[in-house]
Image: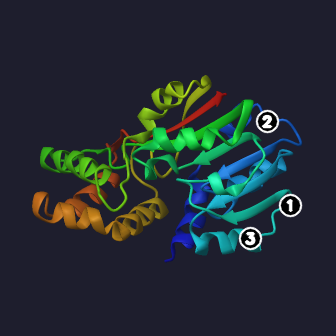
């Protein structure tokens, strides 16, 4: 299954409406959707009257987003770590979902994004925290997960911060943003309780299959981790500590 197909499947388990209702969005505002992927949120923002520019670095995902020809939205390819070359006039709003964690130095990246936001404009960030934080797991597996998070964050070829969700508020406040709202979002794939639905369990199998770095890291530290994790998701007493957090702020 391609990444685009996985994203399409996962879309049914995201819960965007509560955070979209929080946005101080007015019809006609220019909004930048950073990390737009297939354009799902660009379409949702445009449907609420925004003039949206969706930005992503993944050519495969952008090709599919572009083919949708979303009314009120345009799609461009750019590296979210440096958008200085876009040549935009300041926008009224910035939306970014599940993108911040790809930048362990997100404070610097956020500062660069805010150069594209007009004074008084708004920004909404959505990110998860503790993706693999599911129980019950053995202590060996839990310690391995914590060590893997740290290894991923420090990876010299491009890290990923699995704890980014819990860091967003402080990073935003350091940039002088005023937090308007902070919410946890229900998510049927990432932060559910009890036994996983069959399709959700398969989605996790596919997610773990493409996480080669986790496979390599766990091989010697927690052999059998993948099956143990999937077994945990299948239990009635499964508990998720993973959270999906949404923050809305004003510059």
Classify mark 2: residues with Cα within 10 Å, few (<14), some (14-19) or many (20+).
some
- Checking the image for residue 71, the label placed there is 1
Tell me residue 20's x, y (percent): 71, 39
Tell me residue 205's x, y (percent): 37, 66
What residue sits 85% from the left and 35% below the top?
26
Q: Decide which of tag 1 and tag 3 comes sooner along the chain.
A: 3
| Figure check: 100 above or below 37 | above
Mark 3 residue element: helix
What residue sits 39% from the left and 50% below the top?
195
User: Could you say which quadrant of the image residue 8 lies in?
Assistant: bottom right
Q: Which residue is mark 2?
A: 25
Q: Which residue is mark 3?
A: 66
Q: Nearer the viewer, residue 165 or 105?
A: 105
User: Rounded to the nearest whole Å, what is the CA distance between mark 1 and mark 3?
Assistant: 11 Å
- Checking the image for residue 58, the label placed there is none
What residue sits 36% from the left and 38% below the top?
241
Classify mark 3: residues with Cα within 10 Å, few (<14), some (14-19) or many (20+).
some
Mark 2 residue element: loop
Q: Quadrant of the C terminus?
A: top right
Q: Decide which of tag 2 and tag 1 comes sooner along the chain.
A: 2
């Amino acid at each position: 299954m391609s990444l685009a197909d996985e994203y399409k499947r996962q879309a049914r388990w995201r819960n965007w409406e509560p955070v979209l209702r929080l946005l101080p969005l007015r019809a006609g505002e220019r909004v930048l959707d950073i990390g737009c992927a297939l354009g799902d949120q660009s379409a949702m923002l445009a449907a609420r009257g925004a003039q949206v520019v969706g930005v992503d670095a993944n050519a495969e995902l952008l090709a599919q987003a572009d083919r949708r020809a979303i009314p009120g939205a345009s799609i461009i390819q750019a590296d979210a770590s440096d958008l200085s070359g876009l040549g935009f006039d300041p926008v009224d709003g910035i939306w970014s979902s599940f993108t911040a964690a790809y930048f362990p130095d997100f404070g610097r990246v956020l500062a660069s994004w805010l150069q594209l936001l007009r004074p008084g404009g708004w920004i909404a960030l959505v990110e998860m925290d503790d993706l693999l934080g599911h129980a019950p797991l053995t202590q060996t597996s839990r310690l391995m997960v914590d060590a893997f998070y740290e290894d991923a964050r420090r990876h010299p070829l491009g890290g990923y911060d699995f704890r980014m969700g819990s860091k967003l508020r402080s990073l935003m406040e350091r940039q002088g943003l005023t937090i308007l709202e902070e919410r946890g979002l229900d998510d049927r794939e990432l932060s559910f309780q009890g036994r996983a639905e069959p399709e959700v369990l398969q989605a996790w199998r596919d997610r773990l299959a493409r996480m080669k770095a986790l496979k390599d890291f766990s091989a010697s530290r927690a052999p059998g981790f993948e099956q143990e994790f999937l077994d945990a998701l299948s239990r009635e007493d499964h508990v998720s500590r993973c959270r999906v957090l949404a923050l809305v702020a004003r510059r």
